[in-house]
Structure formats: C-alpha cells, structure tokens
Image (cartoon, rainbow, N blue to C red):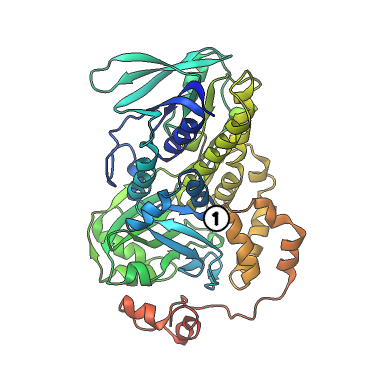
C-alpha cells in the first residue's frame, strides 16, 4: 500500500533511478531532478563523462536489479550486453599470476554504461508516479538541523528558482554532491570524510572486435603487481554491444597514462603481459582516446553525526565513491536501493526514522569500501586520508592475508569460489574469516600447475588470429574451448 507522501530524488543516474523506483513503490509521488537531458536511447551524455570507460555490474547487484526491475537486465542483454561468467569467461592476470578458468560461480554484466543506464531508465520512468525534471539542479536544502522539508532548485535554462516540498529528499548527485555545504547551512557539524587516493587515471578506446570475438572470446584483464613497489599499470579488453571491444588502460599515480592515440598501443605493450597489445594490434580503432583522472575512493559518514535531519538520505557516489577499476559502484547503489525498499516495507517516515535508515544504507558500502581502499593502499604514492583503523594500523596484516588468498585462489577452485562470491558482492566480506574458509586455505591445491601463459584455447586464439604462445596454452585450453 502506497502512502500519500512525496519524495524528491536529486540525480538521475544509476543510483538515483533505482532510488526513485523504490520510492514510487511506496510513496504517492516522486520528483526526479537531473542536470542533464536524459537520452531516450543508449548514448553518452555530458554529466556522466566516466561512462566512456569500462563498467561492469556484478552478479550481486544484477540480482537486486532483476528483483526490483524484472526484465531490465534482460533488456540490456537483448540490446547486446554480455553476461560473463567468472572465471570461466575471463582471462585474468592477477597480481600473483594467471588465474585458472574455473567453472563460473558468479558473473558480471558487461556493456556500455549508457546501455546499462538506458535499460534501467526505460523501466523506471515508465511509472506514472515519477515526474522527471531535466536541466534542473539543486541549490540548497529547505528546513533546519532537525528536518529537511524540501529542496530549492534552479532551472539551467533561464535560471528560475523554485522550492520543491518533500517528505523525503535523497541526494544521489554523485561525486560532485554539495551535501556537506548544504548541511553546514542548516547548522549541522561537518560530516566526517575518508579519502584513499592511488591517483588512478584511465585512458579508453573502442575497437571493432574480430568476427565472433564479442561472444566467443573471453574478457581479458591484466592487473599490476603491487609487490613490485612501482606505479601500477593495468589493461582490460571487455566485450561491448555492437561487436565492439572497449579497451581501458589505467595506472596509479606516476604511471604515465597514455593520452594520445599514438601512445595507446605502446603503453599496452608495457603491461606485465603483451596479451592486450596483441589483441588490439591489428584491430580497427573506432573512437579516439578518452581520458579520466576521477578515481579516488571517498566515503562520507553521515551515520556518525549525533543528529541527522528527518526527511534526508544520501546514497550512491554521494555517499561512497570507489576506484572504478574494482567495479563496485553500480552494485553498491543497487544494495542501497534494496535496503531502502526493505525499510519502507516495514517502517514509515516518522521522526528519527531517517537516521536509522541512513545507518542501514551506510552499512551496505562498508564491504566495497574496504575492498577498494585496502587494495589501492598497496600501490606506491597512494595518499591515505582515512582514519579507518583497518586502513591504517591494521593495513599490514590485511595486506599479508589478502596476498595469501590471492596466491591460493589462482589454483584452488574452492578458495576462488568464496573469493568470487565476496568480490561479486553476493556474500559478505566476513566469509573470508570463517573457519570453513580458513580451513580451505590450509588444504592442498587442486593439483593445477602454475600458469606461465594466459589460459586460452586454440579455438579462442583462432578467433583473434593469434598463434599459440606455448604448449601451456594448448594444455589448459582444452578446458576453455580448445
């Protein structure tokens, strides 16, 4: 049963769309405020420049989206996105070596970010309870330190201002959120913020994939080895809709990111393995190089304030933004939407409820925060502006444990399965500390050899016109389509 209450959601990207949909299931009406004009088809837009780089939706988040929006994931797949099984359909050079391609335990949805947004947006905005206000930005919150009763907005065309009254305002405006400034104007103390910044930068270019490669060739991920104690360099080749490969090269601070087309392939050759360079060496580029330097892990702690105004919530990148290389942002937003849905099913929006709900939403970002921030701390020149003890005095112990897990997971299917469950946000990170998992860590490996070459089969190599690189490939390839 819906309540005759009105909500305003600030931000019409992934997190805002999911939140607006949930609110429309429980409240009388929702106004969705967005600076951009949202396209009616999958295409790039000015307010989401990071959409030009690779994005993945982990299975933990995809299942939530399927539950909240039945058919949305299917729409994306029908339009060309690909469901990629981990590790069966992925060739990964981890920090510790090549990962064996075990049968798929979890999956990711790979497709262009505009496509993924469109698949959700088409579903969400079809509802009659959501009014979309485009080319409109939030100026300030209306209310005081006890309660937010609305938001003042400004039309980007003409500059007219108006107040939108609301029983609930949700900030999903992303990394550029003005929340801390808005709360200060209401007389509230500053929200604590942690930042872990490895100086990550991205350069992305799209290529025409060889015939059959988007469906018959695995995704490729070549990671840096943090133990080398030098700036990390990474490269991925991910299948996209329309017979394309999206190739993103990245680095941590000091890694000399390629920003010109003529530097793209040489940089790919500088990675720990030449596979990415070999794949794109003869492929036709179909876009210029797009560069981004937005990648610091940043987390706010609104739940730590002694008082939090009723009628206000924050989620998505406004609450916690992660280094995109880890692929957790979209799934974290989906988890927040699921918490919001469950809470509104059992509670009303009475006095004090917003603070409890905000605490519950903030809990959903803790696992991806620790996974992303702790991994980035491994790289030289990472700037740690966090007071989280797990990222300070406890960081060395965590790093040793993670290195042990990484080395074991390459050749142990059972260990890999647990790790994949956690990374895909299908299971809590605490599963890595259970007695069962610690027992798995003590067991002998599965008798699998340490791979010296990428685990590609002859049939896969033929698709991309690569000769067999060694006998290792022929041996392991029999289980991978060879």
Q: Which residue is drawn at 36% across and 49% down?
A: 113
- Work out which quarter of the rendered image holds the N terminus and state it: top right
In screen coordinates, is 62 left or right of 265?
right
Q: Which residue lies furthest to the front in this view?
A: 1
Q: Residue at x 31, y 72 (%)?
A: 212
Query: In the displayed structure, would residue 252 be above or below residue 353?
Result: below
* Res. 327 visible in picture: yes
Q: How crowded is mark 1: few (under 14 residues within 10 Å), some or many (20 or more)?
A: many
Q: Which residue is drawn at 49% across and 37% down?
A: 316
- Work out which quarter of the rendered image holds the C terminus and state it: bottom left
The picture places residue 26, in percent across and down from the top left corner, at 52, 30
* Res. 198 visible in picture: no
Query: In the displayed structure, would residue 12 be above or below residue 198?
Result: above
Would you name the residue on which mark 1 appears?
424
Residue 251 or 456: which is nearer the viewer?
A: 456
In screen coordinates, is 456 left or right of 359?
left
Secondary structure under tag 1 reads loop
The picture places residue 270, in percent across and down from the top left corner, at 38, 66
- Count all numbered tags in the image, as a single digit: 1
The picture places residue 269, in percent across and down from the top left corner, at 35, 68
Residue 1 or 419: which is nearer the viewer?
A: 1
């Amino acid at each position: 049963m819906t309540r005759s209450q009105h909500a305003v959601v600030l931000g019409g990207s992934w997190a805002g769309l999911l939140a607006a949909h949930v609110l429309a299931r429980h409240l009388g009406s929702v106004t969705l405020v967005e600076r951009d004009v949202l396209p009616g088809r999958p295409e790039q837009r000015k307010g989401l420049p990071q959409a030009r780089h690779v994005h993945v939706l982990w299975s933990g988040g995809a299942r939530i989206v399927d539950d909240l929006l039945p058919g949305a994931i299917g729409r994306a797949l029908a339009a060309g996105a690909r469901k990629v099984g981990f590790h069966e359909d992925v060739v990964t050079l981890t920090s510790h070596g090549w990962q064996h391609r075990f049968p798929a335990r979890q999956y990711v949805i790979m497709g262009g970010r505009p496509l993924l947004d469109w698949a959700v947006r088409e579903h969400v905005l079809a509802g009659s309870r959501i009014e979309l206000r485009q080319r409109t930005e939030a100026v300030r919150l209306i209310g005081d330190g006890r309660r937010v009763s609305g938001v003042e907005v400004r039309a980007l065309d003409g500059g007219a201002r108006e107040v939108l009254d609301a029983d609930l305002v949700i900030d999903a405006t992303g990394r550029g959120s003005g929340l801390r400034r808005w709360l200060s104007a209401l007389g509230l103390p500053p929200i604590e913020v942690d930042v872990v910044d490895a100086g990550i930068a991205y350069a992305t270019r799209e290529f025409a994939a060889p015939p059959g490669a988007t469906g018959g060739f695995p995704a490729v991920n070549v990671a840096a080895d943090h133990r080398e104690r030098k700036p990390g360099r990474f490269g991925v080749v991910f299948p996209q809709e329309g017979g394309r490969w999206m190739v993103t090269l990245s680095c941590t601070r000091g890694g000399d990111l390629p920003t010109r087309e003529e530097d793209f392939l040489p940089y790919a050759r500088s990675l720990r393995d030449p596979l990415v360079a070999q794949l794109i060496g003869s492929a036709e580029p179909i876009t210029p190089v797009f560069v981004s330097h937005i990648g610091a892990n940043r987390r706010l702690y609104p739940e730590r304030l002694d008082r939090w105004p009723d009628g206000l919530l924050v989620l998505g990148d406004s609450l916690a933004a992660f280094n995109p290389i880890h692929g957790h942002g979209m799934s974290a937003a989906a988890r927040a939407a699921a918490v919001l849905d469950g809470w509104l099913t059992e509670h009303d929006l009475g006095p004090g409820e917003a603070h409890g709900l905000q605490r519950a939403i903030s809990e959903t970002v803790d696992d991806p925060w620790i996974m992303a921030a702790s991994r980035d701390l491994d790289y030289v020149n990472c700037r740690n502006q966090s007071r989280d003890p797990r990222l300070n005095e406890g960081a060395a112990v965590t790093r040793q444990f993670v290195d042990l897990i990484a080395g074991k997971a390459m050749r142990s299917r059972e260990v890999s399965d647990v790790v994949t469950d956690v990374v895909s946000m299908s299971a809590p990170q605490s599963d890595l500390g259970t007695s069962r998992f610690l027992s798995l860590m003590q067991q002998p490996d599965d008798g699998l050899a340490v791979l010296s070459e990428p685990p590609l089969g002859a049939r896969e190599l033929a698709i991309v016109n690569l000769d067999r690189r060694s006998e290792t490939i022929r041996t392991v390839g029999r289980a991978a389509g060879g």
